[in-house]
Amino acid sequence: MKEDTVIRLEICPKCGKPYTGRPALSRVDNETLICPDCGILEALATLAISTEEQQEILATIHRYTEGRDHSEH
Ligand SMILES: [Zn+2]
């Protein structure tokens, strides 16, 4: 067992959901650590992308990363 196999669970203060992996730095105050999903959404929001489109992009990213995770195992 290597150390990087340990999953650390953090709670995102923005959406309140637990997440694993590297947190993102909130663009709102530049110090709050949020989940990668919220980091993506904040980045998309600054690009003036609509909420609907943000969800679509996020779903696409999830599909891609999840598919990659499965193929690696
Ligand atoms: Zn979040």
Image (cartoon, rainbow, N blue to C red):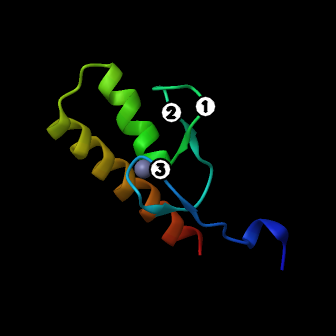
Count of marks overlaid on the render: 3
Q: Is residue 67 left or right of residue 19?
A: left
Q: CA distance from mark 2 to mark 3?
A: 10 Å
Mark 1 sits on what residue? 31
- Regarding mark 2 in the picture, which secondary structure is present there? loop
Tell me the tag on residue 26: 2
- Regarding mark 3 in the picture, which secondary structure is present there? loop
Residue 57 lies in quadrant: top left
The residue that appears at 35% across and 58% down in the rendered structure is 63
The residue that appears at 43% across and 64% down in the rendered structure is 67
Residue 20 lies in quadrant: bottom right
- For ligand 1, tell me if the residue under mark 3 lies within 8 Å: yes
Question: Could you tell me the amino acid type at mark 3?
Answer: Pro
The C terminus: image quadrant:
bottom right
Q: Earlier in the sequence, mark 3 or mark 1?
A: 3
Q: CA distance from mark 2 to mark 1?
A: 6 Å
Tell me the tag on residue 13: 3
Question: Residue 17 at x, y = what percent?
Answer: 42, 61
Disc 2 and disc 3 in contact, CB within 8 angstroms: no
